[in-house]
Amino acid sequence: MTATTTTRDHALVTTLRTTVTGDVIDRADARYDEARQVWNGLIDRYPSVIARCTSRADVIAALAAAREYRPPVSIRGGGHQIAGSAVCDDGLVIDLSAMTDVTVDPDTRTARVGPGARWADVNTATQRHGLVVPGGEVSETGVAGLTLGGGMGVLQRAYGLSCDALRSIEIVTADGTVRTASRTEHPDLFWAARGGGRGLGVVTAFEFELHALGPQVAMAQVIYPYDEAASVLAAWRDLAPRMPETVSPEIALWSIPPDPAIPAEMHGVPMVMVAGLHAGPVDEGLEVLAPLTRLGTPMMDASAVVDYATSQTGPDPLFPAGARYFFKSHFLSEFDDDAVAAVLAAGDARPTPQSLVIVRTMGGAIGRVGPGESAFAHRGARFNVSIDAGWTDPAMDDAAIGWARGAWDSLTPFATGGVYVNFAGLDDDSDRRAVFGTHAARLDAIQRTYDPDGLLAGAAARH
Ligand SMILES: Cc1cc2nc3c(=O)[nH]c(=O)nc-3n(C[C@H](O)[C@H](O)[C@H](O)COP(=O)(O)OP(=O)(O)OC[C@H]3O[C@@H](n4cnc5c(N)ncnc54)[C@H](O)[C@@H]3O)c2cc1C
């Protein structure tokens, strides 16, 4: 930290304290260490100040202070981005985590969601009406970052990505102007926000279209022994894309988690987990999902009719905040036997029980949105492979990150060359051509239009 930075920071903090009504937390504040933490314990950044905005007016004030003092700026929604982009060193964090309101209008099937909301907040509010937004797979994850990067989940083949359910966003751009972007208002911003939404401004509300589903849904969750991994994975590869689009099958090479519902002697044992949820009538769901239970000899079949909201909170304990994580991903348009072998080799070499390789099936509603209709650049892919390292001991950092990078390299020959911005760890995958494909130039031009001075350039570059 230089003397100039210190003087600037002092003035920045003083200004924020007089203009922002929410908490303004600087390095001297007893809450500073807690406030700078994000979900990923690998991330250890020291911002100059954290402005916990409570309203659109606070966001406008925070951006005004940023224009005056020009610190690096990061934007925090749910704080779950793997690379920790919600926090920056020696700059201003515009923290939206207090803005969690969700209002639902069942008549128009619309939900208006605050930028600090988690999927749990959305599910609780929408499921009261038997309605749903296609979200992520873990309920503690933030809505904002997930949606702005695309948003893959268990309903993706039925209803599309989270960003496909957007009707509009309210966004404060770098100049402090509040804009609504939709298909008819600022359509360029709306195009960019759906998959390329980092660095356009600060989104202060998301308006989603809702689908009728729940509260009860049929869900398959089957554990196969790891020594059947090769045959189960090959059979799943053949089955998954042929299943009805009401199902978005996924398969994970993982270890049995320390779940109290599972006998203790099974904890930590390598496994293959196959899962899917039926986005349709409950009474036919388990039958539709049944082929997922016949890929080998299950060790455990927990397929059942469950509450949709419960199906979303179930995975939360498997990804505890504060542990260390590093993810990388590929999209595949083909998944041939050599690619199956490479996924298996990656699974065999997992460095810790918490680390997993997970393959998600794409297609369906994702591919029905035209490739040029939004900034999300991977509509044509058939699968996504995510290599997710998780560990707790800092001494494991190099081994765990090295495993994920090595596994990713080994899958490169089978991949489209695209990467998913939401699964990017550290500064890997910051190549905008890989993230945004042929959309990169159009996206850059839109960012320059709404932020010509690059006030939020750091937020756009950091994943
Ligand atoms: C346990 C876990 C499970 C996950 N599961 C899924 C999944 O199923 N599907 C999936 O697609 N992804 C998933 N992800 C990845 C997830 O999409 C990203 O981590 C995403 O960034 C989380 O959003 P957030 O608001 O919590 O992130 P944050 O870290 O708060 O934000 C990430 C970035 O988004 C931008 N941003 C955030 N809020 C705003 C805003 N209001 N206005 C403008 N820019 C903003 C900023 O550039 C910020 O740096 C998962 C992540 C974790 C940790």
Image (cartoon, rainbow, N blue to C red):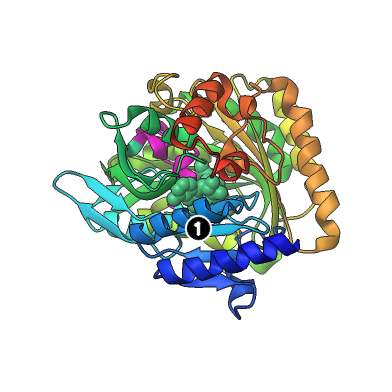
Q: Nearer the viewer, residue 77 or 82?
A: 77
The residue sitting at 50% across, 27% down in the picture is: 443
The image quadrant of residue 179 is top left
Q: How many marks?
A: 1
Seen in the image, is 445 located left or right of residue 390?
left
Q: In the rendered image, is residue 138 in sight?
A: no
Seen in the image, is 428 located left or right of residue 150?
right
Q: Is residue 212 above or below residue 262?
A: above
The residue sitting at 43% across, 71% down in the picture is: 18
Q: Nearer the viewer, residue 409 or 189?
A: 189
Count residues near mark 1 (Cα–Cα under 10 Å), then give few for <14, some for 14-19, many for 20+. Answer: many
Q: Quadrant of the N terminus?
A: bottom right
Q: Which residues are magenta?
A: 143-164
User: How far from the left and from the top, in percent, is residue 101?
Assistant: 32, 61
User: How far from the left and from the top, in percent, is residue 324?
Assistant: 71, 58
Q: Amino acid at mark 1?
A: Ile
The image quadrant of residue 319 is bottom right
The residue sitting at 58% across, 32% down in the picture is: 384
User: How far from the left and from the top, in percent, is residue 196?
Assistant: 49, 34
The image quadrant of residue 212 is top left
User: Is 267 part of what is drawn in magenta?
Assistant: no
Q: Is residue 199 above or below residue 39?
A: above
Q: Which residue is mark 1?
A: 94
Q: In the rendered image, is residue 316 in sight?
A: yes
Q: Quadrant of the C terminus?
A: top right
Q: Nearer the viewer, residue 325 or 8?
A: 8
Q: Is residue 330 above or below residue 76?
A: above
